[in-house]
Amino acid sequence: MPEPVVIATWPFGKLAADTALQLLAKGDPALDAALAGAQAIEDDPTVRSVGFGSLPDRIGRLTLDACVMDGKTLGCGAVAGVEHIRHPAALARRVMEKTPHIFLVGEAAKWFALQQGFPLEFPYTPEAIREWLDKHPDRKKEKPADDKPAAPLTYDSPVDEHNHDTVTVLARDLKGHLGGVCTTSGLAHKLPGRVGDSPIIGAGLYVDDLAGAAGATGVGEEIIRIGGSLFVVEQMRGGKGPQEACELACKRVNAAAGRRGVHPAAVAFIALDPKGAVGSACTARTNFKYAVARGGKTELMQAKEVPPDA
């Protein structure tokens, strides 16, 4: 019988991995377990980059993105830019199961959530609002003291690559099937309407029982640019182990940055192959840690760093 295995991004992924492993041990399917693990992070208001309590965009709105994928059937679903819905990953699964589509966005995704019985909820915490105001002092008042309008949004501000900690959860169940979930609030202080890699099948997540599962975290624009998670899975399909596949993805991110003459952004990948082997790698200065759960215990691991000249 295959051994249950879970791998999840970042130290807070330990809660996700613990939660998922308990369900896998009872015989739950991989996708069910991965979703429960991801939802545990969505429900934690201290995690400022996933679920309610996260940091809003530049105009103060909190929008959430998520996707799910079933490795047995290649079934998948995704949502992006969703407001006032606490569990976007669960909503993404409804898209997979209840519609002929894969991806719903914005107000339409929220209307679908209401039709599916999801309640509207207030997503902000005092801590997140306070932190947002500290980053946007010009918007603390409706009008500045000199009666001039608030500063307009700009489109050339640098991306803050330290506020993008997506949780991705990959799981293998007792039957050997794979499932994965990716959920996030995206980059803090992003431009309204910005969507990163996390809800994009093939970028933030890809799962196939025949090849393996992979997920990503970091600056989504760079992960999208190389088709990150699908790239990792296809490397495993071609015979590479999960560790080597993740390192190759980081090298590809580095090479893409080099072609544009910029320093590689902070990104990381995790992978799980059909035999239960795991791997992870990150670009320089990312300091990426991830959780691996198997055999009744969960450990935090340090990802291998791939420098630009590797």
Image (tube, rainbow, N blue to C red):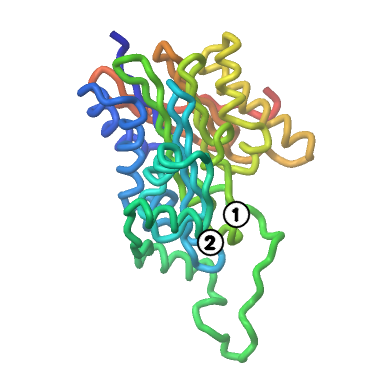
The numbered mark, 2 or 1, whose residue comes first in the sequence reads 2
Question: Where residue 1 appears, x then y in whole percent?
Answer: 28, 8
Which type of secondary structure does the marked residue at label 1 adopt? loop
Up-down relation of residue 282 to residue 157 (above or below): above
User: 84 or 215, which lies in front?
Assistant: 84
Is any atom of residue 45 visible in this view?
no
Marker count (numbered): 2
Q: Quadrant of the C terminus?
A: top right
Q: Nearer the viewer, mark 2 or mark 1?
A: 1
Question: Where residue 209 appears, x then y in whole percent?
Answer: 46, 17
Give me the residue at 66% from left, 73% from top: 152
Give me the residue at 62% from left, 91% from top: 146
Which residue is labeled 2 in the image?
57
Q: CA distance from mark 2 to mark 1?
A: 9 Å
CB-based contact (under 8 Å), mark 2 and mark 1: yes
Mark 2 is surrounded, within 10 Å at the Cα level, by few (under 14), some (14 to 19) or many (20 or more) other residues, namely many
Query: In the shown orientation, is residue 199 left or right of residue 149?
Result: left
Give me the residue at 58% from left, 35% from top: 203
Query: In the shown orientation, is residue 12 left or right of residue 132?
Result: left
Give me the residue at 47% from left, 66% from top: 132
The image quarter containing residue 14 is: top left
Question: Where residue 92 appears, x then y in whole percent?
Answer: 43, 43
Name of the residue lying farthest toward the left:
26
Q: Of the numbered discs in the image, which one, if any, rests on residue 194?
A: 1
Mark 1 is surrounded, within 10 Å at the Cα level, by few (under 14), some (14 to 19) or many (20 or more) other residues, namely few
Question: Where residue 263 appears, x then y in whole percent?
Answer: 70, 40
User: 57 or 75, which lies in front?
Assistant: 75
Which type of secondary structure does the marked residue at label 2 adopt? loop
The image quarter containing residue 26 is: top left
Q: Amino acid at mark 1?
A: Arg
